[in-house]
Amino acid sequence: MKDIMTAPFLGEMIELTSQMYRLGWDERNGGNISMMLDEAEVSEYLSLDRVLRNIPIGFSAPTLAGRYFLVTGTGKYFRNVRRDPETNLGLFRIASDCKTAELLWGYRDNGRFTSELPAHLMSHMARLTVDPENRIVMHCHPTHTLAMNYVHPLEERAFTHTLWEMSTECIVVFPEGVGVLPWMLCGTNRIGEATAEKMKEFRAVIWGMHGVYAAGKTPDEAFGLVETIEKAAEVFMLTAHLPRINTIRDRELQELAEAFGVAYRKDFLNL
Ligand code: 2HA
Ligand code: ZN
């Protein structure tokens, strides 16, 4: 058995949490990440029949039975993950009852997974129906995206359109737009269900006045989505109070999307 501290998936999780913390996206215990792993890669580092603890997940995840997840811990700070991954992260398998997490490694201080597990696992289930290769769901509180929530209508079409206008790469990076949810109580199955519903259509979902969820096949895809949204939101916040004398026009956004061959939300443009 190889040492789990050398596992590429663990290294990737440490990089993600450290970089997100440094970018100011995850103050204190803000944010959470779930990474779906293949049984074959987990079995190189852990004995699959050595379950440390069973933890109820509080809902049923029927299509995830037997799937493995590396997930940040509840109340844990992203900034501490590198120093002590075994306390701040956990690796578990969803049991055959679909309602229990079988902990194989981590949460060493008797901790448990993020309070946002419903939104994570429900989002994984939703993304897998539209993209069988989806592996990552991440949640964070990027500063400018959050700021924009207070001064811009929380409406999918308008929010997406503004982001697209703020930087040329936006429509290419998220041609399907961004989903938007109103403010809702976090940590509940209800916000999990609402997020998952949006995740069938969008890889990025704004949680009104809270933060963003993003999904992807790889950490780069999910991270890149948040980065691009946050950059556009920053440009918006830097310019929102100034007279706008230039913009990328809708026919130019269309030209871009067509030149890059992406399936974009035509109905989000005024053509
Ligand atoms: O606790 O970000 O949404 C971490 C959070 C909750
Ligand atoms: Zn949050």
Image (cartoon, grey):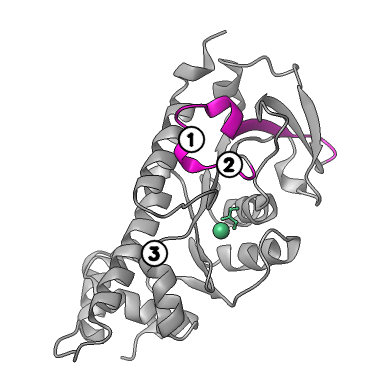
Front-most of residues 120 and 145 = 145
Q: Split into 4 quadrants, where in the image is the N terminus?
A: top right
SS of the residue under disc 1:
helix
Q: Which mark is residue 203?
A: none
Residue 57 lies left or right of residue 80; in this view the side is right
Q: Which residue in the protein does label 3 denote? A: 143
SS of the residue under disc 3:
helix
Q: Which residue in the protein does label 1 denote? A: 80
Type of amino acid under label 1: Asn
Q: Residue 76 carries which label?
A: 2
Front-most of residues 148 and 97 = 148
Q: Residue furthest top?
A: 1
Query: Is disc 2 in contact with disc 1, using a CB cutoff of under 8 Å?
Result: yes
The range drawn in magenta is 74-97
Asked if one can make out residue 175 in the rendered structure from this viewpoint, the answer is: no
Relative to 202, say whether 238 is above or below.
below
Q: Does the magenta stretch include residue 188?
A: no
